[in-house]
Image (cartoon, rainbow, N blue to C red):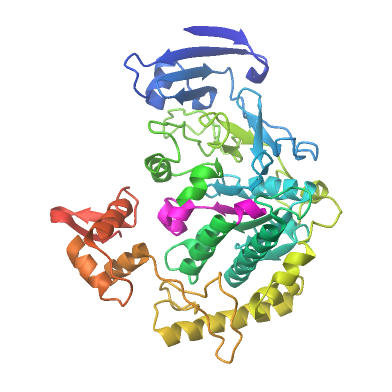
Amino acid sequence: MNATMAHPAAAGGELTVFKVEHPEGTAISYDLEALCKKLGIDDPGRLVVETQGCHGLVMVYPRNPLAEVRAATREDLVMDRHGRYVTGFYHNGQPVKKRLFDPSTGSAQRFVLFGTTGAGKSKSLQLQLIAEKINGICTWLADLKEGQSVPEAAGNVDWWVTSQEGAILMLMAAVQVAKARMRRYSAMGRNSFVLGDDPLLHVWIDEANRLLERGAPYRELATFLLKELSRTGRSVGVGIGLAAQASHLEELGGSDTLRAMMKEGEVVLLRWTSSMMRQLVADGILPGGTQLVPIPKTLAPTVLRSPFDLAGDDADAPGTQGMAYYPSGQRPTALMRHLRVGSIAPLPGRDPEILALYGDGEPRRLEDASVQALGGEFEHTAYALRNDGPGMDALCEKFRQTQQRSAAKTGRRGSAAPADAGDHVGDHAGDDYDDGQDDHVTLPPASLEDRILTVLQDAEAPMTAAAIREAVNADGGREVGLGGVRNVLTRLSATEDGPVTRHARGQYALAT
């Protein structure tokens, strides 16, 4: 069935809609280039395809419906009664409402924002942070691009750091807040978070790939702390968010916790890599058979030109920054675009339009009960020094040196020293800090995945699963079985861009 109709989102033209259904009841798949050719479309941006199992809609617009989008207003960013705010619009003009809080369950949310370079990740994160301030959410932000990613957030969030050490101290403190609230709420007989008493606390790690990629100095500790927050934070109003560039999940710690965050959290996919899309489907984050139309870098139509044809330069073609898919929403395969925030042209300093959206008021602060519950030298002092640049720098340096001493004592691979690219193991976020003479910290066990990758990194030739198991069990950690090793190897080598490649005769090697 097809229909042609006038539609507001069609920018004054007619929208043609084809309803399709696979006759055998299997999931619909399609070739975008072939479909454009069949329909006589020279600009793929005019074609929108949404699928759900064996059903699909093919929509042809007279022009790209998301070529332009209006600027965000403070009214857009106020939560409705369902805990959602307007973050953008779908191709058909319907608003995209992103959840900040779930009042029906009292659960804090988990957020994941993926996008390649130039996809609009920073501006999309700005919208989220501004909405959090407007709605009285206490925000902690680690901007691991040395503070350059979202500079306007400084002074508009409760805690802002720019180093990996600062990010770890922030995560450690957040775990303590979650556990302190858990004890306090338990004494009150409360089994969920009630909006309006203590503030929601959202902890954001921007450029999270820098903290979680293989070789990062605090990768293992950061993954451990994220797992603790994911496990303890939802029912006590502590949410966690990751904004990252990554080609596959192994670059983000590769843990089941991060996969769970994506399955259950608020996920936004800006322009992505093909390997990431395959893995999202393979891991069940997107339904099997899901196919999303790729988001190009620009909205320039694809035109075949002679190399001698100098006309028609598309350098000024509109970009696609902010275009995305929102798999957690009601229309997971519908293309959307975020509301515009800030100036389109680069500015020499902080953007006045973004600052105006944040407003002049003070950001929501952490409640006194949780501040008093921050124990240990690092966690309590870090929060107290959050607005003292030199003091915070000195504390981060002390933490870095403490981690180096701990790694040296235990003989574990990975130190906070920049010269050491090995995996780092840090202190146990769930324990109280021991500020004794040795600055001792408890080390979480290395994951089986990291132990396997370490073995393969040191190997001179591909190894069988049995040989890998033998080497893993010789590293002094917990003994593991062959089945567990094989399961992890299968997952690590499941995609073309995965960290492990499988060779002939069941042998494995680190991908190059």
Q: Is residue 71 left or right of residue 224?
A: right
Could you tell me residue 510's position as x and y percent? 28, 62
User: In this picture, is 44 found above or below 141?
Assistant: above
Instruction: Please state the extent of the stretch shown in magenta in the rendering.
Output: 233-258
Q: Picture quarter containing residue 214? A: bottom left
Q: Going 43% across and 50% down the picture, which residue do you hit?
A: 247
Q: Nearer the viewer, residue 262 or 422?
A: 262
Magenta-span inclusion, residue 248: yes
- Report the quarter where the C terminus lies: bottom left
Q: Residue furthest left?
A: 505
Count of numbered marks: 0
Q: Going 47% across and 76% down the picture, which residue do you hit?
A: 443
User: In this picture, is 171 found above or below 132?
Assistant: below
Q: Nearer the viewer, residue 406 or 128?
A: 406
Could you tell me residue 381's position as x and y percent? 70, 77
Q: Picture quarter containing residue 466? A: bottom left
Q: Nearer the viewer, residue 150 or 117?
A: 150
Q: Is residue 72 left or right of residue 379?
A: right
Q: Picture quarter containing residue 46? A: top right
Q: Is residue 173 left or right of residue 278?
A: right
Q: Residue furthest right?
A: 360
User: In this picture, is 72 found above or below 510?
Assistant: above
Q: Going 61% across and 85% down the picture, which residue do you hit?
A: 435
Could you tell me residue 160's position as x and y percent? 70, 64
Let me know if residue 451 appears in the view. Answer: yes
Q: Going 60% across and 69% down the picture, which residue do you hit?
A: 172
Let me know if residue 386 appears in the view. Answer: no
Magenta-span inclusion, residue 107: no
